[in-house]
Image (cartoon, rainbow, N blue to C red):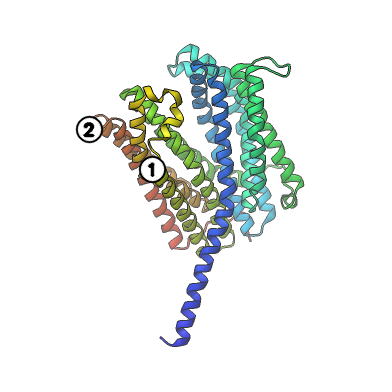
Amino acid sequence: MTATETITVGAAAATRASLWRAELAETARLAAPMALIQLGQVAMMTTDLALIGRLGDAALAAAALAHTVLFAAFTIGMGLVSAVAPLAAQAYGAREPRMVRRALRVGLWAAFMLSVPVTLVQFWGADILIALGQAPEAAVLAGRYLNGMAWAILPAWVFIALRNFMGAVNRPEPALWITLVAIPVNAALAYVLIYGGLGLPALDLVGAGLATALVDVGMCAAAIWIAYTRRPFKKYRVLGRVWRPDWALLAKLVAIGLPISGALLLEYGLFAAAALLMGRISTSAVAAHQIALQVAAILYMVPFGIALAASVRVGQAVGRRDAVATRRAGFVALGLGVGFMALMTLIVALTRHTIPLAFLGSEAPQSGETVALAATLLVLGASFFITDGAQTVAGGALRGLNDTRVPLLFSGVSFWAVGFVSSYWLAFPMGLGAIGVWIGLSLGTAVYAVLLVWRFHLLTARHYLPAVPGAG
């Protein structure tokens, strides 16, 4: 190799390295506010449950039942409005501002059309729970909570659609500011409506649901105002011709979004089934499982934010028709997510005996068995946390490619054919109990992560780029 060739190769390597560093910086810049938004949502939910808990165990159990009904219905629409992100990001990358607006518009249309039946279903929540075999007293209390929460569905979906639009044009910060303001407002409003104050009567569980709904309406209104009046969103005229049907793009949104909903429901169903398996083992197993799962849920919010950023970065590269950048964006996000979860896993492992005490509080001295089992499950979570982060980010990268149907198939195989079957077999026939359940969960999540990463590698290695509606 001549000196000139050596210099050329070195310059090319330096250029590639700088491109990877730049991609890492952009992904982190997008992911940070998106992850903080998710953590803000967790903070609001935790505040609500803490306030409801002061009403007694029956009220807290009813709230948990109500969330079961609400989440199953809410996830359907959440998947649809999540599809706004890749469609808008692809249009942004293709420099098609009208298509950015159209992507948001069909997301809003989907939210409005679906919200009518989904909201109405919540008012029959008590009947649904009784039909599912729940105690009538608990079901009636859960129904009271749903009577208030039902009104939160539409504004929550609209806020998610607007948040995805903001992220797609590289400006997710306003959605974070709105969320940060909403956290203390939600706490104050929930306290007043649950327990009474400022001349208002105590509305207990109905008040808790109404507080959430009112805060979601406020967040939605603030996001609409910012998107319509503030730069750089103003130029997209997000409410322009919002009444105009766009059936072709709406069909594409549904084709991308419904499989996202399906995969989320399959994953949620696995963890609900795991809780039922724990109930067959012991009360300590249920409590330890909930502690470990809550830790996993909090940690999950960061890779979920990175996954949202991955959808945007991959989608923007698709819009530019840059296959190399598409592949780079996905793998940079994947490395960021796995790296973060590896660090968190180490911290959790080192503090595994302390973490359960934060949940059990003064009850900890009488709950030695639960503390010990929770500590063991948190150590077993070492593989689960990392693979959960990997599957989340890889799924986000695939959404940037509009690839959601095959991941839906993967989720069914991974979570149920592998995850649930192995959890049951290890827990009962093999006699491992709660430890077996968590090994099964880890196996299912690991298989899903491997399949999704393999899928993204396969598509981007052959420079696959989906068609961008309206481009060209």
Point out which mark residue 350 bears. Answer: 1
Q: Please state which of residues 38 and 91 is positioned toward the viewer in this rendering.
A: 38
Residue under pointer 2: 430
For residue 403, say whether it is visible: yes
Q: Tell me the CA gap for discs 1 and 2.
A: 29 Å
Mark sitting earlier along the chain (1/2): 1
Q: Nearer the viewer, mark 1 or mark 2?
A: 1
Residue 70 image position (x, y, % from top left): 53, 27
83 versus 431 height, above or below: below
Identify the image quadrant of the N terminus.
bottom left
Residue 90 image position (x, y, % from top left): 59, 55
> What is the total number of numbered labels drawn onto the structure image?
2
Residue 243 image position (x, y, % from top left): 72, 40
Q: Please state which of residues 20 and 111 is positioned toward the viewer in this rendering.
A: 20
The kind of residue on which mark 1 rests is Leu
SS for dot 2: loop
Crowding around mark 2 (Cα neighbors within 10 Å: few <14, some 14 to 19, many 20+) is: few
Residue 295 lies in what quarter of the image?
A: top left
